[in-house]
Image: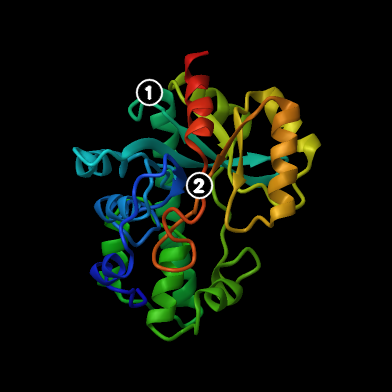
Amino acid sequence: MPQRQPFTALCRAAARRPATGRADLHVHTSYSDGTYTPEEILSLARRSGLSAVAITDHDTFSGVAPARLAAIGTGVEIIPGAEVTCDFDGRELHLLAYFCEPTAGRLAAALDRLRAHRLGRFWDMVDRLAACGVRLDQAALEEHARQGTVGRRHLAAMLVESRRARSLREAFHRYLGDQGQVALPKLRLPVAEALELVHEAGGVASWAHPPYDGTRDALARLREMGLDAVEVEYPGHRPARVRQLRLWAAELGLAVTGGSDCHGAGPRAVGSRSITAAELEALRRLTCR
């Protein structure tokens, strides 16, 4: 994988700030496609002055327990979460599931299916790359596969490391993106089913990073299916889009969420986007319905 800035250097570069009551509800760890371990995420959350951080790895809750263990005695709340891959009107949609019981039967089984498909898709794309004359290090591939939740980002990083692409962007454009040479479809849960499973597991669900062509009508339809919240604070959202999403959420009676979508070192740092303590409590209260 590309060389990342040493974690200790990141910590030295950031002055620790007092807790602000703010929460970053969208963070990935090494248990999916992030480069930071749960313990490193916890340290960065403290450095950023966060009072709470949600671990939201793709289709897994596996990073939550080690993050909670690391958070003991720190005053930082670790919120259990997962980013669930869904289908809505034939397009990919991601739900951020919060406060779920990670071992809840039907949700856990559905996430197991998604991860199993991810792993098979990973090896199928490796085979397709080989057919294109691009062979990657087998030991590194097997190490990624052992992590459990693998995908295109891991392959993109290896393509950059092996100098078959100059950047992650090029790796996706040339090989791995939806129009790339080795692209394969991803298994997605119907969004109505995913919402039902999240609620059955005691959780609440937010529409992650709604695209710019995501409309109020689409949000209203999801609300009718059981959607609880919408992600308004997000690195890719311009101020006008944030205001628009907040207005729609208020009109439709939805809670709001927000976060950095941190995957590692870079502009999407832990705590770079967040919501207030009051907004977090409004989301939490929905679990009591």
Most extreme residue toward the front, as rendered?
18
Residue occupying the point 57% across, 64% down: 183
Q: Which residue is mark 1?
A: 105
Marks 1 and 2, how far apart at CA? 31 Å
Which mark is in front, 1 or 2? 2
Q: Quadrant of residue 89?
A: top right
Q: Which x, y percent locates residue 22? A: 45, 42
Q: Quadrant of residue 106?
A: top left
- Write the residue at 34% across / 62% down: 35
Q: Position of residue 245 (x, y in %)?
A: 71, 42
* Depicted 137 relative to depicted 234: above or below: below
Mark 2 = which residue? 274
* Disc 1 and disc 2 in contact, CB within 8 angstroms: no
Total labels drawn? 2
| Rendered-image quadrant of the N terminus | bottom left
Give SS at disc 2. Answer: loop
Residue 232 x %, y %: 63, 44
Q: What secondary structure is marked by label 1?
A: helix
Q: Nearer the viewer, residue 70 or 31?
A: 70
Please state the horizontal and vertical placement of residue 253, each as a whole percent of the image.
Answer: 69, 24
The residue furthest top is 289
The answer to whether 138 is drawn above or below residue 105 in the figure is below
Q: Within 10 Å of the Cα at label 2, are there few (<14), some (14-19), or many (20+) other Cα atoms?
A: many
Q: Amino acid at mark 1?
A: Gly
Q: How is the image coloured?
A: rainbow
Q: Residues within 10 Å of mark 1 (few under 14, many from 20)?
A: few
Mark carried by residue 149: none
- In which image quadrant can residue 230 be found? top right
Residue in view at x 54 percent, y 33 percent: 279
Residue type at numbered disc 2 = Ser
